[in-house]
Amino acid sequence: MPITLSVPATTSNLGPGFDVLGLALDLWNTVTVAPAAGWQVTVEGEGAERLPHGPENRVARAFRWVFQTLGEPLPPGVHIHCRNRVPVGSGLGSSATAALAGMAAALAWLGRPLDRDQLLAWTVAWEGHPDNAAPALHGGLVAAGLEEGGRPWVLPLELHPLWVEQARLVLALPEVDLPTEKARQVLPRQVPLADAAFNLAHALQVVEALRRGDPDLLRRGMVDRWHQPHRVPLIPGAARAMDAALEAGAVAVMLSGAGPSVLAWALADPDAVEAAMREAFARHGPVRTWQLRISQRGLQVQGNP
Ligand code: HSE
């Protein structure tokens, strides 16, 4: 029986919570791993033309890496099939979904328990930061970080039913190539003390607004001085799209992860928010949009070989 893994898209940072806050979204990549005569990787859906179909595919690399790390012999043949719905290079954690799926598939293949702390530590070793992997593993809203020694920690946070049941996260993804690496290079190495205090204060407002179900507080809290001011100018139309989303009634708006996608929180009339963001981006080039819900579930695994 094949192993099937489902891993949700995630949005990280949530405005001021740079590299710490993350949220799982109800948009899933599914990976099936089955015994086969040789090694084969097939990809359908998002990134099918762009992602490697050979042994260098990230899911396949993560799968093999776990066998090597645990000193286990590799199976003689495996067919890995990726059904991708999370757009690649968009700021929705698609690379974390691939690493997690490959690593979790290897644990399931070996009949080992799905140790989420271990998976988080491994994924962080690959990704460098935990704010996509942690919500993809645990679902919902999380805070995550690294201890002094580099060990990752994760803290699931409370989400008010208002957000889980009613909010639509309207995502606009312009056709802009902004790799995370580049979007990190543009950030200053140091922030002024006043900006550090500013972001800390606002990140706490965001966490409390999401716990209380307070749209006004979310709007006030979702301001950032650390990364968005350096990244938004690299994405043509993003500044206008963010303003347009708020004018169309969005509660709050943020860059999703390192971008280039922009996410608006809508409680009423998400169609109007979507249309406004589309129009703003469309002046600069092609744009795709989604209306997503929050996912309270993280990584799901079914079956064994
Ligand atoms: N927190 C990371 C960043 C997310 O903003 O660079 C990258 O996906």
Image (cartoon, rainbow, N blue to C red):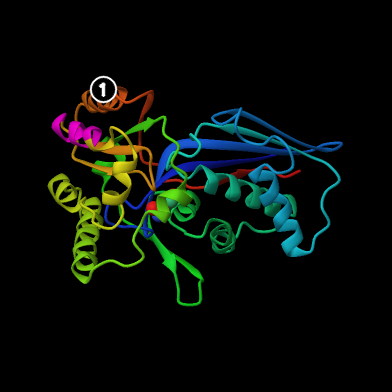
Our reading of the magenta stretch's main secondary structure is helix
Any magenta on residue 246?
Answer: yes
Q: Residue at x 63, y 38 (%)?
A: 31
Q: Is residue 68 left or right of residue 227?
A: right
Q: Is residue 196 above or below residue 275?
A: below
Q: Residue at x 59, y 63 (%)?
A: 118
Q: Residue at x 58, y 57 (%)?
A: 126
Q: Residue at x 45, y 46 (%)?
A: 297
- Mark 1 = which residue? 279
The quarter of the picture where the C terminus appears is top right
Give residue 27's position: percent from left, percent from top.
45, 35
Most foreground residue, 244 or 211: 244
> Amino acid under label 1?
Glu
Displayed quadrant of residue 260: top left
**Magenta-tinted stretch:** 240-248
Q: Is residue 296 above or below residue 170?
A: below
Give residue 134's position: percent from left, percent from top.
46, 56
Most foreground residue, 88 or 20: 88
Element carrying mark 1: helix
Q: Is residue 125 above or below residue 282?
A: below
The quarter of the picture where the N terminus appears is top right
